[in-house]
Structure formats: C-alpha cells, structure tokens
Amino acid sequence: MNEELLKIRHSASHVLAEAVLRLFPSAKLDIGPATDSGFYYDFDIDHKFTAEDLAKIEAEMKRIIDENQRFEKFEATREEAEKIIRQNGQELYKLGRLADVPEGEKITFYKNGEFVDLCAGPHVDYTKRIKAFKLLSVAGAYHRGDENNKQLQRIYGTAFASKDELEKYLFQMEEAKKRDHRKLGKEMGLFLIDDKVGQGLILWKPKGAILRQQLMDFIMELLRAQGYSQVFTPHIGKLGLFKTSGHFPYYKESQFVPIVEREDLAKMAKENISVAEFETRIENGDAQGFLLKPMNCPFHVQIYKSDPHSYRDLPVRLAEFGQVYRWEQSGELNGMTRVRGFTQDDAHIFCTPESLDDEIQGCLDLVKDVFSTLGMKEYRVRISLRDPKSDKYVGSDENWNKSESAIRKAAKSLGVPFTEELGEAAFYGPKIDFVIKDVIGREWQLGTVQVDYNLPERFDLSYIGSDNKPHRPVMIHRAPFGSLERFTGVLIEHFGGNFPTWLAPEQVRILTLGEDVVPYADKLLADMKAKGLRASIDDSADKLGAKIRRAEMDKIPHIFVVGKKEAAEGKVSVRSRMKKAYDGVRDKAEAIELIVQSAKSRELGDAFEDK
C-alpha cells in the first residue's frame, strides 16, 4: 500500500468515527487504523449496528467529506493528552491507548471539524481528498484481540484513490462471496466444522476426502521423483523435545496447553496447586508433560538422528503429511483457511553446506510445479529475515548470515519480484514465502521454504565427512501447499468449485432418458469405474433440463446423456465443461478415454470458465 492510499484510508477511518459520534453520541471509541484492504474502527455501544445503520453512517460520512474539513496535527504532553481525552468523554479505551505510547515519544492528535483523536497519522490535508469509499460490514472484535476483554463492534470499510478502483474492488468482493469456500464446501459436501467436535477442526466428508487424496497423490509423485522418503510420526511428543527445538516456549502462546501425565496430575490434586503453578513446574522441568505437536520438525530430527550418516548418504529428504495443532483465537478462525488442527505437506532435508544451494533450488522447483499444474501463474516472493534487535531468534550471527545469504541467492534465481521483511523469520531461520494471486486477483500466502542452521546445533546432529570427521548438516524446512486445509480452501475459491477433471470429486454424471436405458447406463458406469473414473447415475424421473441443471449446480465437469438411440448404438451424448471440443455424440469407449486422458494429464481445460 502506497503512502497516499494509506493516508486516504486512515483519514476515512476518522471520518467514520466522527459520523458514528454524530449519530450515536454515547459511542466509545477504541482504534481505527488503515489496513491492506481498507480501514476499520472499533466501537463500544449498547446499540447493535444494522445494515440500515451502515447506510446512515455512510451518508453522514459523505456530508463530512463535503464539508471539506481540514486535518490538523498537534502535539500534547501526557498530562494535556489525558485532559483532552477526558474532555471528549473517551477515557474508557483511549487512556489505555495513551499508555501504550512509550515515555519520551511524541504524543500527537489529529483534529478535523469538531472531531479530535489520539493518532500518529498520517492523514490527507482535507476530507474532500477521500473520493471513493464504501462501508462493508460489521463484526465483533475483542478489545486488543483478547477474548477475555469486552467484545466491541468493528465497522469495516474500504477506500481508494478513484471510483474506478473502488468499483473494481467491490466487484472482486462480490466474486469472492460467490466463491467463498465455506459456502461452496457446504453446498458441494466437501467438509464440515461441527461445534460438538470443536471450532477450527475440519471434518473431511467423502467428497472432500477425494479432493484431499488427489492432492496428496499429486505431491507424492513429485516427491518420489526428487528422492524423498515418506515417514509417519505421532500427534503428541514429550515437552522436553519441544524445549530442545525451541518451539516451547518460543511459540508457547500459539500452542495448546501441555498434556499432563497421570502421576503429575495426581500430585497436582494432592498438593492443591493451580494450573498456572503447574505450568510453571512444567516449564522449569519439575514436572513432565506432552504437547500436541505444533510442528513436525523435532520428530524428523529424531528420525535422522536414529542412524549414523556419511556425507555419501546426504541429502536425507524426509516427507510427511503431518497433523499439527496450533491455538488460534476463536475470532481469528475462518473455515479451512485458519484452523486449529491442520495437515502440513511437510518435509525436512538434511544436507551438506556444499549442496545447500542445489537443495533449495529443488524445493523452489517443486513449488513452481505445484502452482503451474493448478493454474496459479501469478505469484510474488517474500523473504522473511530476522530482526537483529529482537530476542525471539536462536543461533549465532554467523549462522543467520549464512542462511539469509542462501535465501537471497535462491530468491534471485526465481526471476520474479521479491520483497524483504525484517522480523518475520521463523525463530530458527529465514524463509521464502510464495504469495500467489488467484483468478480474481486476491493474494494468498501458500508455499514456504526455510533454511535452518540452528536446529541441527540444538539437537547436535552430525554426519561423517570425506575427512572422516563429524560435521554439522544444514536443515531445510519446506511445504509447497503449506497445509492441506488452507490450500484446499484457497483452491475451492480459486476454481470457484469448478475443479479440473483430475481433482473433481465426481468426474462424470450419467443422465438417463427413460427407464429402459438404465441397464445400459449401469454398464456404462461399470466401464467407467473399471477405468478408475469417479462417476454416478441420475436415473430419476425428472426431465433432462432439471437433471442437467442439478449436475451443473453440483459442478460436475462432464455429463453423459443416454437415450434409446445412444443405447442402441453404443454411444453417449457428451456435455463437457472442461473442453467444448469434447461435446457431441461419441462412441462410449472413445468418450470414456477422453475423460481418462483429461484426468491423467491433469489438464485445467475450462476450469475457470465462470470467472
């Protein structure tokens, strides 16, 4: 987001707050920043905002903009700032935000019209610079993102420099609603989230399981070609393992609470100690526990460590579809794209420093193969580096310099734009993230490749070199999909549910014209299943038009219609979404082979025809 757009959006959030106070004077304000997609403001108010309220607020915002109020910045001492906040009746949340300003840092306010807000800026000069905006929705948001705090009402909006840009964005939003994976997933019977099971935990239904298995088979073909070995590891492990790796306590807030051993649980009850006290004992090593694994890395490390290795054995490439668990705030959960339990297409490569560049390149080639096959042609690369001033990273400066140098070199080889982000590295090493643009222009962070000199040291890994002495391997973490859940959610929206033949849970549906052709349709179905196709029959008494509409709503890529003439001649009438060249009356064996070849070749066909 450029500086000018940031100013427009931030200014729009202040105009939003002013409009709300004009219409609802009792509202208490929290914060209202600009975001990558627009802006929002959080309000504490007894009244529940409705769609009608948003229309009124938007109209009031337009009046404020037409007044062409000037945005004026001024500084205040801490005492003056507190006085201003109290005079405006906004001490409930604003005094807390004032306390966030470090001692010695300037305290600034912005004033437009009668509205004054604690703010660091930046803003446009006058409200009339806000030429294209739209309020979008209302949602609940816990104060400071903590579910233990009061839930406020957050009004979301967006703003652009021109009306054309706004209209383009709103069109994209409407397309996104049609493609919402939560909506399509339910309609297509792909997955389920059940409160009795738990929020953020995905139940893959039979059709969704087919989609998942096809993705797994696809990636495994690529992995076998690159010499990976598949492994399986448990869902939990001893807490000490994750202390050694650094995942505990570095990721403590993103993990489930440790699982207590029965003996320690009995001691806890006998001594009448609190959960907090017991967690302290676990952290200090005075009590044992297990952890639902947040990462697969420590398990793969132990597999590598279980055998002696020579430089001739390396690289060792271990791959797993490993189920991991992260604690996400309930307000951050979102269908399949933000969950608490997910399956990583995870792999770890243990290699010599001399082969590091080649191994990284192999990982990048793998990610590019995945994106190319799935029609994800537009992507950018983001390099995440450590912030040397932060204490959240482990390892020596020397190791970090080597790993960051390798990451930069690899990113340059891709020939696509890349950016560097300080402070976004994993605690053990830098990474390359792939940010793809889907068919309607939205960006998603998917594949990742990470270089790690630190975990091999923390676990004391080694191999015997050509000099017959022990050496330290380098470790690469990589996941082309990221997670099967998130990747599937993105794919559903990318294709709008119109999956190519090889991914479609149901590839062909046979529609019958009359009861007397059902035996022919049954034989046709058996022939297709014998060829490995996923097919079904609609032999209901409905008219053909209704059957076709039902198949299209179910997003079946190929429809075979059979009537008396087709049955007598051993033919089918083909209607295909994937390739219109398939359409027409064909010999049944020829028609089946066309679909088989489409699936085998993993062609996209017209998977995006409704974009």
Image (cartoon, grey):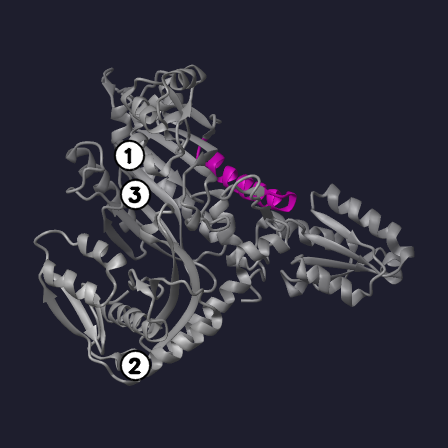
> Which residue position holds label 3?
431
Relative to residue 20, is residue 607 drawn left or right?
Answer: right
Few, some or many C-alpha atoms within 10 Å of disc 3 (few <14, some 14-19, many ≥20)? many
Q: Position of residue 491 (x, y in %)?
A: 51, 53
Q: Does residue 597 show up?
A: yes
Identify residue type, mark 3. Lys
Q: Is the Cβ of the residue at disc 3 closer than 8 Å to that at disc 2?
A: no
The boundaries of the magenta stretch are 204-228
Q: Residues within 10 Å of mark 2 (few under 14, many from 20)?
A: some
Work out whether residue 9 or residue 495 is closer to the camera in this orientation and state it.
9
Can you say which quadrant of the picture contains the N terminus?
bottom left
Task: Indicate the amino acid at tag 2.
Answer: Ile
Q: What element does badge 2 sit on? A: helix
Judging by the rendered image, the residue that carries numbered circle 2 is 65
Queried whether the magenta region covers residue 219, the answer comes back as yes
Q: Amino acid at mark 1?
A: Tyr
Q: Nearer the viewer, mark 3 or mark 1?
A: 1
Q: Residue at x 35, y 49 (%)?
A: 149
**435 to 199, vertically: above or below:** below
- Relative placement, left or right, of 185 versus 125 is right
